[in-house]
Image (cartoon, rainbow, N blue to C red):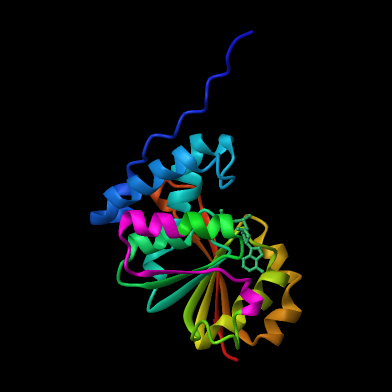
């Protein structure tokens, strides 16, 4: 019987330096920590290591230039995109909203290990946050791989202040998801809804972001 070789961590793509600038060392330390402990903690699958940088870290970091003010990330899991964005944008106040204790423990330990002062970890389900007094209405909310738009919009829009924005990272079927979410788009008074395609020009995997203004 031959022993199987553990999958190798993807080499850091050249684009990482431009996306993280002087925060690159912190991004590297988060990637190293996630690669070392992520599988054991059930945060990432073993097959993710060969695409950790390109599919997960840079896919998340591409959203960083769109951020402003107080931002929440719903369903952060391992820290995607919220922790990556907080690393890239120390000027942004980031709240990671995640209900699973094992995941919030991991997020808190990473925030402490990296000395990030712009991150708060809130253990909660997004739908329980409005009206709880735990979080003031946010300027923007991000989410990635949490649910389809028809359920994700009702989870995220109530967290945003009037005139704030949703930035929802989506896959190639975002158009179909949006078509079947029209009822909640109207109910939550989203306008200026657009799908941004980020990264392709820079030779990266395309990150699709549903951006919409919330006007409750
Ligand atoms: C598939 S994981 C994705 C994690 C991460 N965003 C990523 O892209 O890798 C979905 C995450 O959403 C969280 N989640 C599920 N329902 C939620 C809710 N109602 N409010 C907040 N987080 C939720 C789960 O606990 C889980 O960590």
Residue 63 position by quadrant: bottom left
50 drawn magenta? no
Q: Percent position (x, y) of residue 75?
A: 58, 63
Q: For this rendering, which residue is in front, 160 or 167?
A: 160
Identify the residue shown where x is 38% and y is 49%. 30
Residue farthest to the top, as pictured: 1
Residue 78 relative to residue 126: left or right: left
Span shown in magenta? 108-128
Q: For this rendering, which residue is in front, 55 or 78?
A: 78
The answer to whether 96 is drawn above or below residue 159 in the figure is above
Residue 149 relative to residue 207: left or right: right
Identify the residue shown where x is 51% and y is 88%. 161
115 drawn magenta? yes
Residue farthest to the left, as pictured: 22
**Ligand 1 found in image quarter:** bottom right
Residue 109 position by quadrant: bottom left
Q: Percent position (x, y) of residue 134?
A: 52, 82
């Amino acid at each position: 019987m031959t022993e199987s070789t553990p999958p190798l961590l993807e080499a850091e793509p050249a684009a990482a330096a431009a996306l993280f600038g002087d925060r690159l060392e912190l991004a590297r330390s988060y990637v190293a920590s996630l690669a070392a402990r992520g599988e054991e903690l059930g945060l990432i699958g073993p097959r993710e290591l060969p695409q950790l940088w390109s599919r997960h870290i840079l896919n998340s970091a591409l959203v960083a230039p769109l951020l402003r003010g107080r931002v929440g990330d719903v369903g952060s899991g391992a820290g995607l995109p919220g922790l990556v964005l907080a690393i890239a944008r120390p000027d942004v106040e980031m709240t990671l909203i995640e209900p699973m204790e094992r995941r919030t423990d991991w997020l808190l330990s990473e925030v402490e290990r990296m000395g990030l002062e712009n991150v708060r970890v809130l253990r909660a389900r997004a739908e329980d946050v409005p009206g709880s007094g735990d979080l003031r209405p946010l300027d923007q909310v991000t989410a990635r791989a949490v649910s389809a738009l028809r359920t994700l919009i009702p989870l995220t829009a109530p967290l945003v202040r009037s005139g704030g924005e949703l930035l929802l990272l989506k896959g190639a079927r975002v158009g179909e998801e949006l078509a079947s979410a029209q009822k909640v788009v109207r109910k939550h008074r989203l306008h200026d809804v657009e799908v941004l395609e980020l990264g392709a020009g820079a030779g990266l995997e395309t990150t699709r972001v549903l951006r919409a203004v919330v006007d409750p």
